[in-house]
Image: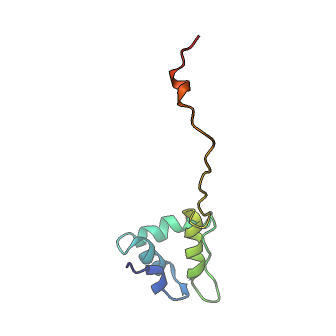
Amino acid sequence: MTIDPLSQLPLFANDQQLAVAIVGKDRATMWVKTVIPQLERKGFPRIDPLHDGRPVPLVRRFYEGYFGITAGFNAAAPDGKEDWSVWNRRRR
């Protein structure tokens, strides 16, 4: 069983805490400087001025949508019986 690093954070986390939880300690500084501004343009939750941090549940929801997890999966229905004889027909 793996431990979810986002679940270990407070309800509102600062960018450094989020970065460590998402990309690890080694890449956290780069992620805060370069990646967060790009993600904000795509809907990444903004810092709440009252709590001085980003709401962690919304960060989780952002990533679920970002990776298509919330979109769900649709199984394709069969499109009919296969006719393999078409491959044996000669062209005219």
Residue at 54 percent across and 19 percent down: it is 89
Residue at 51 percent across and 82 percent down: it is 14
Quarter that holds the N terminus: bottom left
Comparing 68 with 41, the one in front is 68
Label count reads 0
Quarter that holds the C terminus: top right
Instruction: Tell me if I can see residue 55 in this picture.
Output: no
Colour mapping: rainbow
Q: Is residue 15 left or right of residue 41?
A: left
Residue at 65 percent across and 89 percent down: it is 50
Picture quadrant of residue 58: bottom right
Picture coordinates of residue 46, whole percent (x, y): 62, 75
Q: Is 79 above or below relative to 22? A: above
Residue at 57 percent across and 32 percent down: it is 83
Picture coordinates of residue 8, whole percent (x, y): 45, 86
Picture coordinates of residue 36, whole percent (x, y): 53, 68
Q: Is 65 above or below relative to 46? A: above
Picture coordinates of residue 73, whole percent (x, y): 59, 60
Q: Is residue 5 left or right of residue 45?
A: left
Instruction: Tell me if I can see residue 7 in this picture.
Output: yes
Comparing 61 with 23, the one in front is 61
